[in-house]
Image (tube, coloured by chain):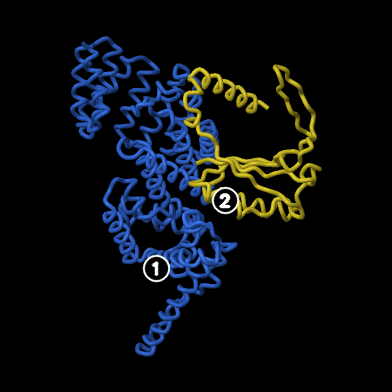
Chain colours: A yellow, B blue
Amino acid sequence: MRVMVMVKATKNSEAGKMPSEELLTAMGKYNEELVKAGVLLAGDGLHPSSRGKRVRFSGGKRQVIDGPFAETKELVAGYWIWQVKSMEEAIEWAKRCPDPMPGEESELEIRPVIEAEDFGDALTPELREKEEAMRREVERRQAKG
Amino acid sequence: MVDAELSRTIEAVWRIESARLLGGLARMVRDVGLAEDLAQEALVEAVERWPAIGVPKNPGAWLMSVAKNRAVDRLRRQRMQGRKHEELAQNEPRHHVPDPEGALDEDVGDDLLRLLLVACHPVLSAEARVALTLRLLGGLTTEEIARAFLVPEPTIAQRIVRAKRTLAEAKVPFEVPRGPALVERLPSVLEVVYLVFNEGYAATRGDEWVRAELCEEALRLGRILAALVPDEAEVHGLVALMELHASRLRARRGPDGAPILLLDQDRSRWDRLLIHRGLTALARAEALAQLLGPYALQAAIAACHARARRAEETEWPRIVALYDALAEVTQSVVVELNRAVAVAMAFGPAAGLELVDDLRDEPSLRGYHLLPSVRGDLLVKLGRLDEARREFEQAASLTRNERERDLLLSRAAACG
């Protein structure tokens, strides 16, 4: 199964405080371990929400909201995608993670990724094709940029 | 903690730690069989004690220290025996007794690679290598391996016991060869990983779920290997090939379980993350290699399909060129047959048929159902239906797969 592991934001991460060299080294080592275990598929750190935007949907209207966002503990500061055999394996890996926000309380949140099968019939071939076309376009642009 | 939950946790810890544990222990005791015994003893102790003391904060270190203590006991006993022998045979040179404390500090990656190289040692048959690799590096139980390969459990158990004996008898050293010596050993490792993958990917028998697990296990082994020997092009080539093939796993079967051919697949169901990883791995292989090896070439062919948004957009001339290179490297007639199919797609059925006809007298293709099946397909495209029907019927009589036979017979019937 695939899981997304989210590093939750803290006051410091939201303030854009960069991790110490010590933490960077420890994280680098941990990431390497994940790679060497064949677990890590993808992952990145995220800028603070002050550089983020939200698009709010309400009654057919779309409203763009500038960051930063208030509810710090609910925000995401980074993520990984892992390939594991079970939720327990993901938990065991998460427990091995160095404290991502030393000096502050923080959390890793593990969420199983929905596989296409989980959609059942809701995702018709036509919808899939559209989704596909969109992803291609995004990838094409990323490749250019 | 409930028992079921704890046992799942122990299972997870075992999956994460077992290969490292085994690697470290094997380095200490220089014997894979003994290392496995020690690791198993540590696991048994964990199962007995963790319900009372809880899962230790560092479970890997806990398991290692238990196993190490057992190892030290054994080494001590051996040393005592060694001394007695020495007293008897006075001039015999001293045996090298490894120092467990010092040995444990070495690089963990090297341990894993050593373990993988031993499990895939060329003195072992491919079957034995596969079983031992899944056991030692996949942390799979004998029962799980047996279930995956649809073989009785005692057969696998015996295979593993015999493999360990062969390794001991051949005095296979527990070491990582360097440079060309390492490169020489890699094909036998890659072969094992690919065999495991194909067992999961190609077979149409057995439990679907177990099949997918085998593909995932092979991918995991490949990814581990790529991290351990990052400079070897063919390792990345194999990983690329597996990632790209695995990206199509969920598009390969219809709702009724019937296989869907590549060109008929709903491409929106292909796994974009795996495709991305596959293309990245292929780019790495291409950057490392002067000349692409067979895995990277197959990956490059798979990449042509992955890049095509629709089946009609496939770059067939490029695929033909890649098959040319692959045929040259592998000298395989099956590759030649595939090349003929690609030629037909790129330059028309007549050109393909000419190549297929050249292969008809090939002794190694005699009895291979895909030869008449491909021929039939090309004949249909050329409107030569009578001949096509005979080819499909012959193909149907040669295949051992029922679904495929049905398909071939229905194609024969469609020829009128």
Please, what secondary structure does the residue beneath circle 1 have?
helix
Task: Judge by depth and name the residue closer to the eye, B405 or B387.
Answer: B405
Task: Judge by depth and name the residue closer to the eye, A135 or A92.
Answer: A92
Task: Judge by depth and name the residue closer to the eye, B308 or B266.
Answer: B266
Same-chain check, marks 2 and 1: no
Do we see residue B231 in this rendering?
A: no
Do we see residue A102 in this rendering?
A: yes
Q: Separation of disc 2 and disc 1 at Cα? A: 31 Å
Quadrant assignment, res B356: top left
Horizontal arrangement in the rendering, residue A32 relative to residue A57 (left or right): left
Seen at 57% across and 50% down, the residue is A91
Residue assigned mark 2 = A91
Horizontal arrangement in the rendering, residue B386 relative to residue B250 (left or right): left
Q: Which chain is indicated by disc 1? A: B
Mark 2 and mark 1 in contact? Answer it, CB < 8 Å. no
Residue assigned mark 1 = B34
- Residue type, label 1: Leu
- Residue type, label 2: Ile
Quadrant assignment, res B115: bottom left
Residue A121 point in image, percent of width and height: 47, 24
Horizontal arrangement in the rendering, residue B370 relative to residue B279 (left or right): left
Counting other residues with Cα less than 10 Å from the Cα at mark 1, is it few (<14), some (14-19), or many (20 or more)?
Answer: some
Which quarter of the rendered picture does the C terminus of chain A lie within? top right
Residue B16 point in image, percent of width and height: 51, 55
The vertical placement of B26 against B305, above or below, is below
